Amino acid sequence: MKFIRVTRALLAIAILLPASSAFAQQTSSNNHGTAISASYSSLREEQAGFSYWDKGFQADVHQPLGRSIFSLGLGLVGDFSTHHNAFYDDSLKSYLGGVRVTFGSSSMIEPFAQVLIGTEQCCSSSKAFAFQPGAGINVWFMDRIGIRGQVDYRLARYSTSGTSTTYKETRLNIGAVVSLGKR
Amino acid sequence: MKRLLLSAWLVVAIGLVAPLLARNASIKSIEINQAIGVQKNGALKFVAGKETVVRAIMSGAVVVDAGHSSATVTKDGTKVITLAPVASASASEVDFVCPSLDACGKWAAGNYVFDVTVNGQKLSTSGTTYKFQERAGVRALALPVKANYGGVIQSVSGDSWKSTWTFTRSVYPVSFDGFTWTMREELDASDSSFDLETDAGRLKLWQALVALMPEHCLANKKATGCFDKIIGFIPARPGGFPNGNLQGYTYGNPGNIVVASDEDAAATVAHEIAHNYEIGDAYDGGSFNCTANPVPDAFSGKLFADPSQGTKCTAGRTQLGGVSGTLIPSSQHPYEVSGRGALGDAAEYMGSGGKQAQFWTTQDAYDWLFDKFALSSGGSSSAAAFHPQAGAATQRLIEFFGSTKPNPQSAADITLRPWEGFLDDDVVTDTTGTLMIAAVNAAGQRVATAALATKFDIPGPKGLPPAHFNSAEFAGAMKFPTGTTKFQILNGSTVIRELPVSANTPVVSGITMSGGSIFNGPTSIRWTGTDGDGDKLYYSIEYNPDVTKTTTDFEPIITFITGTQWTEDFSKIAGGDHAKLRIIATDGINASYTDSAEFKVPFSAPDVSAKALPQIAAGELTLIATVEDLQDGELPNSSIVWTSKKLGEVGKGAELNLKHLQTGADEFTVTATNSGGMKTSKTVAVTIVNTRIR
């Protein structure tokens, strides 16, 4: 529960920060602005010995912190995704927040890595603690518009009737990214 | 930030280790279950060819990790299959079911070892003998009856009676193919002489059913084409129609009358057949066999072997609440493989007064029947040979039919129906008893004898006390040696009745059928019969759909009529390209027959019903087709094809287990095709609901 509270706090920060993007831009050392992305997403999950590729949607908000370490940009991320499992006719939803590190952010090609935590909701009611490291790449073919490819690996830990099970999931995203601030 | 990341990694580490600890329940035992998991006195009696579930009995409830759970089946040292667990959210028993009989090698006879893993915990049956043994089968003939209830004529409506047999196959220790259920066209018993509201009418219907047993079966009950039971399904309960009190009745083997509309008709079929094997009633007031299947101690009844004596059982059995029947506690693991799965408390099918879903088999009945069905001692062997057409007839026999009052003293105490001499290669040996028939030659010597087995007290209709009759039916076959001049019925040394053997054998000839050489509807059949002695003649008609096949035989259509004309509706009997009729004429002792010319009867389409069993696991569905074909009997699996509206063809066979079906509505159609190319399709609509808990 403690970590869910932390996640919510991070999400709130990531969502609220764009409103204060002027502050971010003023302190940025690498011209990053707030960026939002929306992607088609596919999630590989396993259940009862079978694996599924669930189809869905992913969106995130990235707010640079305006600081860098060894030329790596640091930022906060809020991430939401939903995937439909056709076999069970239900959905997996995730609400995650965390830290993103960007590389070479001044160029057209912008790789990044991130670590997110939060909750995953399955089957309408069950909720799990989720930990999701991942990496991706933004290709800025216009000043503020780019495309994104991303791979994430998620560990979701559910507790039911006193027993706990950790599910391992892989998420693939491809979509568009828009920078709200000046790059 | 550093602190946050550290905490996240710590949680992940805990998350990876904790599930291993939570899934740590161990396997207490492995149970092999074909109907009842905990067998009588710990026995391990398994039937080869019978549907089987492998169960891991856990020390506590577990969430099954399918990726680390399996059951490997090994027969005689060779691996047969590795089974996946049946998905369940949480259970103390983890079940492993074959996707099909074929996938598990049809559970062929042999010694099995089961190696089971549940969430990484392992247990093996190695060191304990799990021997799957061949058992004899059971053969039943079933047909609907057009019945007369005090002048009200009714036929059986619906097809529910057709599938009543599957319950018997489930609860008996017989293989999947070991229960033969042959269905026939409706028996017309609408004549007032069959009035089921009268004793005489009920008796006459029973006699008509018994007469459907092929004649050679009296000489060899295990021969091909013979039946252990002939069941006539009537539409409603007699004994006060339309609110009658008889759930069926019998005057003895092999005939039974069952009410098709009774909700528990399937249990009644199992009940009545079980009486053949000395299984007693299990309802209060019934006929008890405390050795075979002890009933609740609180029940009182009559001895199965001698219903004139009262008895109670003292084996400690109890009653299922609300049902007059022996309790099968859930702790003995009653289980319906390919059906409802694990069952709760139930009542033995020999009981009465319960719903169909409440009946199952006790340890006692299963154990008793398993022994009875040993190939050398009971049941029916499909391999038994009978070749009446093979020209190998070695002796003359005679079928005898009649009834007697207890301890008969005069001819008036004996009622005879026409007897019939015939040639056969089955060996019939002489038997003797107080009451018997003797074949006597001109010198007055007894050249053959047959003891008469008579029962005046038999188990009553289900739910009722044993029935006592003032006359007992007898039937059988005995030797009819050359030179026999008369038959005597003796009670001790007293000759009660004599039947002279006339000098001449009847002659029957000139079979004519109206309408050409292809018959597919009501057809008039005529013949002529003469007898040099001028005796009254009785005729029986038999039909063989294809005389060129060894798999078909002449089977009775009607027996002992006195006219020389009969109308048969060929649209309701098996088709064939080389069909023949046989008319048998008897003067009461001597008999002869003649065959018609070959003719054709168009094939009729198979009779098909389809159902889907209740879904017991995510994505899994069991489809059941009941297919009967007048020509081919049971169709091979390859002739029964299932298609899905969404998926196309999904498999073949009378029973199909599908896995990994997506949530949603679908329609599954089964199409059965017989050897004549005739098809019948039936569709069952199914909504798959897959739910999961994380």
Image (cartoon, helix red, strand yellow):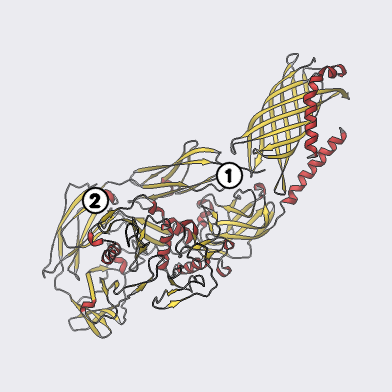
- Asked if residue B21 is positioned above or below residue A72 in the image, the reply reads below
- Image quadrant holding the N terminus of chain B, namely top right
Q: Quadrant of residue A175?
A: top right
Q: Which mark is residue B649?
A: none
Residue occupied by mark 2? B569
Residue B65, how many percent across, how many down? 67, 48
Q: Amino acid at mark 2?
A: Asp
Q: Residue at x 17, y 68 (%)?
A: B587
Please tell me which residue lies in front, B313 or B531.
B313
When the figure is inspected, residue B124 is found, relative to residue A52, above or below; the finding is below
Q: CA distance from mark 2 to mark 1?
A: 48 Å
* Left or right of residue B192: residue B90: right
| Dot 2 or dot 1, earlier in sequence | 2
Residue B289, picture quadrant? bottom left
> Could you tell me how many numbered marks the image carries?
2
Q: Write down the residue under mark 1.
A: B618
Mark 2 belongs to chain: B
Is residue A120 or residue B71 the one in the foreground?
A: A120
Chain for disc number 1:
B
